Amino acid sequence: MSDPTPAYLLFHTSNHAFRAEKLLGARQLAVKLVPVPRHLSSDCGVCLRLAPDARHAAAEALAGTGVELAGVHPPL
């Protein structure tokens, strides 16, 4: 059984979060733009929530796009 706890992709700026949402959506990865849980960060106000088993695919899809990840929780 997979872990139901969601994963989060964190970004340095909201612009990177918006761009990542568009790029990952185009790749058919289910992501949702949400406020950053305060226990994870207080930097950027928004992040992407996704299924924990999709975080590797999401990080790989963003590689080389110019979108910089500030973090992945749980870590890769």
Image (cartoon, grey):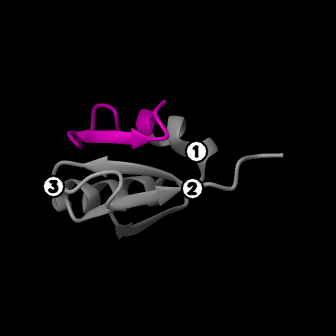
Label 1 to label 2: alpha-carbon separation: 10 Å
**Residue 74 drawn in magenta:** yes
The quarter holding residue 23 reads bottom left
**Residue 31 drawn in magenta:** no
Return the mark for residue 13. Answer: 3
Amino acid residing under circle 1: Ala
* Mark toward the viewer: 2 or 3: 2
Residue 12 placed where, x, y %?
17, 48
Amino acid residing under circle 3: Thr
Mark 2 lies on residue: 6
Against 75, residue 44 (above or below) is: below
Q: Residues within 10 Å of mark 2 (few under 14, many from 20)?
A: some
Q: Along the polypeptide, which appears first: circle 1 or circle 2?
A: 2
Q: Residue furthest front?
A: 39
Label 2 to label 3: alpha-carbon separation: 21 Å
Q: Residue at x 33, y 62 (%)?
A: 36
Residue 75 placed where, x, y %?
46, 33
For the record, the magenta segment spans 59-76
Amino acid residing under circle 2: Pro
User: Would you say the residues marked 1 and 2 are in contact, meaning their CB atoms lie under 8 Å apart?
Assistant: no
Q: Residue at x 71, y 48 (%)?
A: 3
Q: Is 64 left or right of 72, judged from the image as shown?
A: left
Q: Secondary structure at mark 1?
A: helix
Q: Secondary structure at mark 3?
A: loop
Mark 1 lies on residue: 54
